[in-house]
Image (cartoon, rainbow, N blue to C red):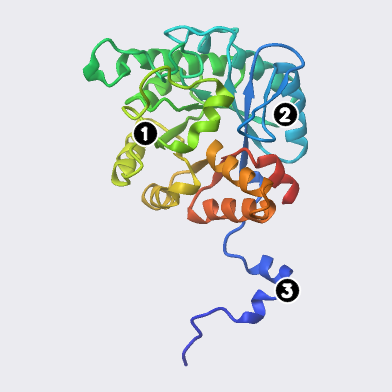
């Protein structure tokens, strides 16, 4: 006796039946909320290109994180906007840096919230690149090897401040190994690494550059971020990060690289994160503001697609809105 190749329509009618039989489930425990922390007090500065998103000072960020914890979200990801910038991004690995102060304040008031920190130099360098700028034009803008000790120092400073997970994002070769070695040597072997393993040189980062105040002063980041045309290269990048000690691997952006998320999960079986980036957020916001689509339905559909592709967790500016929906 043959079996029907299509699910009976009677299971598609009632919304509760659809929920019970759904193959993919999106829940708030899968969501990570990114925040931008800046100097000052009482700051809640709107980000023009990302409606509904803000730069927060440490005190207002703590309040925001308390609300995030109460909403049932498990984690936040921090990006820093420092008081000063220099060629080596030294405020990124200073013990009293803006992110380091934010970590301490959040952990004091939000004990049940995981704090993940972005480990990169682009927010802290006066030139906006993710590493030390090389004098040798053959190096492709940045000096990879000179950058590694600074990324390692930044990760250690975050761990010392109380970070639960560090996330190196500079796309320097060997960055995961450098961070892992430094954490182990400084008695932080228990701190996991979320590696930006397949990070593409995407046009969808534009609003983030405003939010983090980190556009490159010259050139671009294509010398060390990935070509959007390449997928096999992404698998090689992920494999290197796994071999170097990554505990979680990330694909960025998310919605426009669902095939990479799928391949990553299928080929490595690692805990896999996807970053629903600023441009992916802002395009939905812009269309919704013009009445061109239903924002709630678009947000649920797009984030469900990311989980369906294989992601275990999503870093998204829609995390708080999704928590309310779910």
In the rendering, which numbered label is found on residue 83? none
What residue is drawn where x is 37% and y is 36%? 242
**Front residue (pair 55, 174):** 55
Disc 3 element: loop
Q: Horizontal and vertical percent for residue 4?
A: 51, 85
Disc 1 element: helix
Q: Is residue 167 left or right of residue 222?
A: right
Q: Which residue is mark 3?
A: 14
Q: CA distance from mark 3 to mark 1?
A: 45 Å
Q: Horizontal and vertical percent for residue 326?
A: 72, 51
Disc 2 element: helix
Q: Horizontal and vertical percent for residue 130?
A: 42, 20
Compare marks 3 and 1 and give the one earlier in the sequence: 3
Question: Quadrant of residue 83 in the image?
Answer: top right
For marks 3 and 1, give the one nearer the viewer.
3
Q: CA distance from mark 3 to mark 2?
A: 37 Å
Q: Which residue is mark 2?
A: 65
Question: Quadrant of residue 298 in the image?
Answer: bottom right
**Front residue (pair 326, 82):** 82
What residue is drawn where x is 38% and y is 51%? 263
Determine crowd level at label 3: few under 14, some 14-19, many 20+ residues with C-alpha closer than 10 A.
Answer: few
Q: Horizontal and vertical percent for residue 291?
A: 68, 52
**Front residue (pair 164, 124):** 124
Determine crowd level at label 1: few under 14, some 14-19, many 20+ residues with C-alpha closer than 10 A.
Answer: many
Determine crowd level at label 2: few under 14, some 14-19, many 20+ residues with C-alpha closer than 10 A.
Answer: many
Residue 15 sits above or below residue 210 on the image: below
């Amino acid at each position: 006796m043959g079996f029907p190749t299509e699910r009976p329509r009677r299971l598609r009618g009632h919304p509760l039946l659809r929920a019970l039989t759904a193959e993919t489930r999106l829940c708030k425990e899968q969501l990570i909320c990114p925040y931008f922390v800046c100097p000052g007090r009482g700051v809640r500065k709107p980000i023009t290109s990302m409606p509904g998103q803000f730069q927060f000072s440490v005190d207002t960020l703590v309040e925001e994180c308390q609300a995030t914890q109460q909403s049932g979200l498990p984690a936040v990801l921090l990006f820093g906007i420092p008081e000063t910038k220099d060629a080596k991004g030294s405020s990124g690995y200073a013990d009293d840096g803006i992110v380091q102060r934010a970590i301490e304040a959040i952990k004091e008031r939000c004990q049940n919230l995981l704090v993940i920190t972005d480990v990169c130099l682009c927010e802290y360098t006066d030139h906006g690149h993710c590493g030390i700028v090389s004098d040798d034009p053959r190096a492709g803008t940045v000096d990879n090897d000179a950058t590694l000790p600074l990324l390692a120092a930044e990760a250690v400073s975050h761990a010392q401040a109380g970070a639960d997970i560090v996330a190196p994002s500079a796309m320097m070769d060997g960055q995961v190994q450098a961070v892992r070695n430094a954490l182990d040597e400084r008695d932080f072997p228990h701190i996991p690494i979320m590696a930006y393993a397949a990070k593409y040189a995407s046009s969808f980062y534009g609003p983030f550059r405003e939010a983090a105040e980190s556009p490159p002063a010259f050139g671009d980041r294509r010398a060390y971020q990935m070509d959007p045309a390449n997928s096999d290269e992404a698998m090689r990048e992920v494999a290197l990060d796994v071999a170097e000690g990554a505990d979680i691997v990330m694909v960025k952006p998310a919605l426009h690289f669902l095939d990479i998320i799928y391949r990553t999960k299928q080929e490595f079986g690692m805990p896999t994160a996807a970053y629903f980036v600023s441009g992916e957020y802002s395009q939905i916001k812009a269309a919704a503001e013009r009445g061109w689509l239903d924002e709630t339905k678009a947000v649920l559909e797009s984030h469900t697609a990311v989980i369906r592709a294989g992601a275990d967790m999503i870093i998204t500016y829609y995390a708080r809105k999704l928590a309310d929906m779910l």
